[in-house]
Amino acid sequence: MNDLVHTTDAEIDEHLLDGDPMTLRGVVFQLTGDPALAATRVADVPGMVTPLKALVDPHDIELVRSAAAAYLRAHRDAGAPPVGPGPTERLAHSLALAVGASIPPAAVEFCTEELPIEPIPRRHELRQRPDTWATSTCW
């Protein structure tokens, strides 16, 4: 799906079959705020080391894929304009939906930086300019 504008409905549906339902759930909720996505239920499923949270009800999985397809189709039909990250107030809930558990506020801040949601995600302030000689790798 390199060019959404030229993608058919069938291709969108096909590509969404490869998408992780939990990830789609969080992303589409962040973009749309659809309460039906938040109402889907997760359960523990076996993981490699510990249980994982996952959507297990086929109806919930289909609801998530249908919501994602509807969003992509509407976006395609609008000419695929640039998409922002959605409202920051919804981010904690969206992340929780993606992982199946609540996210502590400090982790939400970390995710905001790591997911480049803000235009300038890093908050590090240089306190002192390093000595040029000390940082040089050429002798």
Image: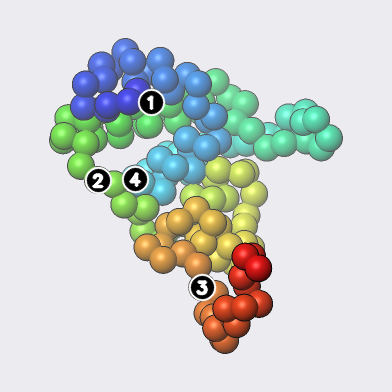
**Which is nearer the eye, 45 or 17?**
17
**Which is nearer the eye, 137 or 69?**
137
Residues marked 1 and 2 touching at CB (< 8 Å): no
Q: Residue at x 61, y 44 (%)?
A: 99
Q: Residue at x 54, y 74 (%)?
A: 124
Q: Which mark is residue 82?
A: 2
Residue 113 x %, y %:
51, 62
Q: Amino acid at mark 4?
A: Thr
**Which is nearer the eye, 57 or 85?**
85
Q: Mark 4 or mark 1, which is nearer the start of the sequence?
A: 4
CA gap between label 3 and label 1 equals 37 Å
CA gap between label 1 and label 4 equals 13 Å
Residue 7 x %, y %:
26, 20
Q: Nearer the viewer, mark 2 or mark 3?
A: 3
Residue 87 x %, y %:
36, 59
Q: Amino acid at mark 2?
A: Pro
Residues marked 4 and 2 touching at CB (< 8 Å): no
Residue under label 4, please give it: 32
Q: Mark 1 or mark 3, which is nearer the start of the sequence?
A: 1
Q: Residues within 10 Å of mark 1 (few under 14, many from 20)?
A: some
**Which is nearer the eye, 77 or 135?**
135
Q: Mark 2 or mark 4, which is nearer the start of the sequence?
A: 4
Q: Quadrant of the C terminus?
A: bottom right
